[in-house]
């Protein structure tokens, strides 16, 4: 082994930090701990039998192509299925608007590769998805956080921030938004707020990145239009993924954007992984073509709605006065707010001692705020564990109060 590995690492690699979530997940993987910390889909939603059959069918009927390299843009059949799905939602996209990616985390990394030079500004929510923050920071981005209310990113603060930046001769590379059942807060941005943000982005000529892994997992309420659709001018890059609505292990996602932007992604992806696995793209396409995807999606949403309702009931029953929470209309996560003076970081080890775990809210805030918040996942643990976990957590919070 060489004498000093770190001294030869690149500046980019030295900027990379171990994910705080992965680190605390290690702590929480003890079987006696009820963990609300991860973001794993429930394995019961994975369509094992159907996939066993479809995998065989793909190998038998499409063997050489399924085992060959795919194009960087992605499998035509899969892109056609996505276009059909968007059409059914009245969103008009064509082949040259879509690239398949190795799930959304790659899309976030490619965004960094394409757009970010060290010192560039990227606007994100307070809070925002940790994996997005980490991807952009790797390329040297300086994140500018915009406060949230119960409708998501506040448009008045966004406009003020962009105006101040303009006065200083600065312009952010893009605005990063997770509009549907946001990770981590579980908040959905209503259509009105989306329109305000699009108007502001157009006024200041800034791209929007709409990252929406949970959009299809709606339990209740009306689905707002995508930001992509509201804009309609090509100023929005929309990221999708099969991770939470099908299976995460396939690592398949996609990007919808203006063809000129897709072109940039194709070039950036070529030197990243050449292409996403042909085999899993073809299995996914056939699974959709057979109409199984929609059925399974309904099953997933039903299961997660039940779990979320169980968690809500347990909160009502056990949480001490002064603790509040978001009530998401879909997705996998919600945010818990402790009284202002409390710090969820201080609570974390005590919670683990009491065999329950969560993710501290500060890791989702690029400015270090959010001390009194925590993210809880409700998709993974059983309904019994949801109740028992909330009991344990509420006891820890009460004791600390
Ligand atoms: N964006 C958001 C908002 C997420 O929550 C996640 C995963 N939790 C991702 C992107 C990445 O997902 P994947 O790479 O599995 O598609």
Image: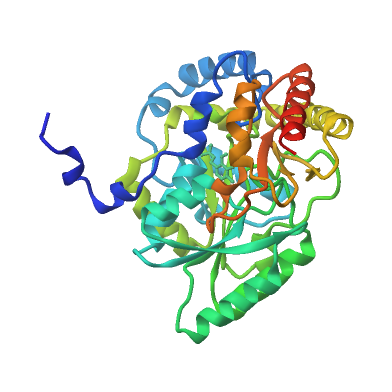
Q: Residue 52 at what x, y percent from top left?
A: 57, 14
Q: Which residue does the image show at 62% across and 47% down from the upper left?
A: 83
Q: Quadrant of the C terminus?
A: top right
Q: Which residue does the image show at 80% across and 43% down from the upper left?
A: 323
Q: Does residue 129 appear in the picture of this structure?
A: no
Quadrant in the rendering for residue 355: top right
Quadrant in the rendering for residue 194: bottom right
Q: Residue furthest bottom?
A: 167
Q: Does residue 383 appear in the picture of this structure?
A: yes
Q: Residue 246 at what x, y percent from top left?
A: 63, 30
Q: Which residue does the image show at 58% across and 48% down from the upper left?
A: 362
Q: Quadrant of ligand 1?
A: top right
In the image, residue 211 sits, relative to residue 274, either above or below, namely below
In the rendered structure, the answer to whether residue 366 lies left or right of residue 383 reads left
Q: Nearer the viewer, residue 199 or 62?
A: 199
In the image, residue 48 sits, relative to residue 11, either above or below, namely above
In the rendered structure, the answer to whether residue 146 lies left or right of residue 107 reads right
In the rendered structure, the answer to whether residue 32 lies left or right of residue 71 reads right
Q: Residue 396 at what x, y percent from top left?
A: 71, 30
Q: Residue 57 at what x, y percent from top left?
A: 53, 17
Q: Quadrant of the N terminus?
A: top left
């Amino acid at each position: 082994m060489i004498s000093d590995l770190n001294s030869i690492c690149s500046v980019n690699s030295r900027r990379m930090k171990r994910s705080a979530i992965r680190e605390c997940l290690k702590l929480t993987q003890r079987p006696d701990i009820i963990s609300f910390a991860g973001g794993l889909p429930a394995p019961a939603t994975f369509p094992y039998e159907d996939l066993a059959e479809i995998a065989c069918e793909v190998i038998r009927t499409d063997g050489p192509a399924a085992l060959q390299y795919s194009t960087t843009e992605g499998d035509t059949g899969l892109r056609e299925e996505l276009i059909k799905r968007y059409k059914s939602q009245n969103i008009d996209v064509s082949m040259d608007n879509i690239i398949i990616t190795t799930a959304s985390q790659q899309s976030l990394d490619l965004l960094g590769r394409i757009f970010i030079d060290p010192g560039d500004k990227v606007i994100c929510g307070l809070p925002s998805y940790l994996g997005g923050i980490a991807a952009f920071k790797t390329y040297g981005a300086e994140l500018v956080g915009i406060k949230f209310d119960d409708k998501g990113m506040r448009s008045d603060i966004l406009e003020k921030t962009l105006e101040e930046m303009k006065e200083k001769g600065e312009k952010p590379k893009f605005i990063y938004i997770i509009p549907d059942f946001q990770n981590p807060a579980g908040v959905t941005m209503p259509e009105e707020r989306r329109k305000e943000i699009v108007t502001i982005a157009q006024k200041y000529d800034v791209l929007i990145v709409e990252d929406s892994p949970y959009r299809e997992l709606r339990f209740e309420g009306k689905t707002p239009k995508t930001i992509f659709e509201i804009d309609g001018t090509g100023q929005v890059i929309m990221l999708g993924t099969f991770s939470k609505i099908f299976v995460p292990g396939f690592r398949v996602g996609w990007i919808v954007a203006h063809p000129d932007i897709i072109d940039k992604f194709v070039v950036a992806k070529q030197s990243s992984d050449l292409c996403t696995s042909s085999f899993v793209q073809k299995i996914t396409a056939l699974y959709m073509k057979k109409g199984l995807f929609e059925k399974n999606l309904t099953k997933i949403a039903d299961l997660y709605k039940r779990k979320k309702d169980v968690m809500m009931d347990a909160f009502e029953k056990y949480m001490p006065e002064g603790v509040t929470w978001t009530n998401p209309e879909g997705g996998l996560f919600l945010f818990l707010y402790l009284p202002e003076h409390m710090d969820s970081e201080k609570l974390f080890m005590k919670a683990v001692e009491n065999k329950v775990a969560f993710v501290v809210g500060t890791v989702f805030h690029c400015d270090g705020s959010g001390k009194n918040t925590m993210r809880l996942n409700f998709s993974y643990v059983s309904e019994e564990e949801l109740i028992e976990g909330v009991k344990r957590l509420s006891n820890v919070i009460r004791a600390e109060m």
